[in-house]
Amino acid sequence: MAVIATIMFSTSAIEAAMFPEFIGGDKPFENIKSSLRGDVTLKSNSDFYKLILWCFIAGLSDNFVYQKLSAWLTK
């Protein structure tokens, strides 16, 4: 989930003041390998901390969803 959240932020699919901002990556999408090697970087130091926070939240929610589905399926 954290990787998916990072991709969503870096492609500007999710934008707001509370989400991290990336610069670079203005090239059109070719394939996932070239986009991961691209020159995309965070706009400021505070954006790094926002990214860490949102990836942590995504990881927690992923674990929460997994536990609920697992409990539901074992009933």
Image (cartoon, helix red, strand yellow):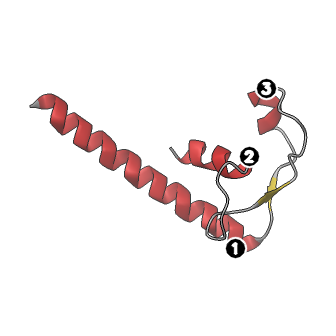
Q: Is residue 33 above or below residue 4?
A: above
Query: Disc 3 marks which amino acid?
Result: Asn
Q: CA distance from mark 3 to mark 1?
A: 29 Å
The residue at which mark 3 appears reads as: 31
Q: Is residue 7 above or below residue 42?
A: above
Labels 1 & 2 near each other (Cβ < 8 A): no
Left or right: where 26 falls relative to 62: right
Query: Disc 1 marks which amino acid?
Result: Ser
Q: Measuring 64% from the left and 46% from the top, which residue is drawn there? A: 8
Q: CA distance from mark 1 to mark 2?
A: 18 Å
Q: Measuring 79% from the left and 26% from the top, which residue is drawn there? A: 31
Q: Point out the residue furthest to the bottom here.
A: 46
Q: Nearer the viewer, mark 1 or mark 2?
A: 2
Q: Dot 2: what SS? A: loop
Q: Measuring 18% from the left and 29% from the top, which residue is drawn there? A: 73
Which mark is drawn over residue 11? Answer: 2
| Quarter containing the C terminus | top left
Q: Earlier in the sequence, mark 3 or mark 2?
A: 2
Q: Measuring 80% from the left and 65% from the top, which residue is drawn there? A: 43
The residue at which mark 1 appears reads as: 46
- Is the residue marked by circle 3 packed among few (<14), some (14-19), or many (20+) residues within 10 Å? few
Labels 3 & 2 near each other (Cβ < 8 A): no
Residue 35 locus on image (x, y percent) = 80, 36
- Is the residue marked by circle 2 packed among few (<14), some (14-19), or many (20+) residues within 10 Å? some
Q: Nearer the viewer, residue 38 or 25?
A: 25
Q: Dot 1: what SS? A: helix
Specify the quadrant of the image occupied by residue 16. bottom right
Q: Point out the residue furthest to the left here.
A: 75
Query: Disc 2 marks which amino acid?
Result: Thr
Q: CA distance from mark 3 to mark 2?
A: 13 Å
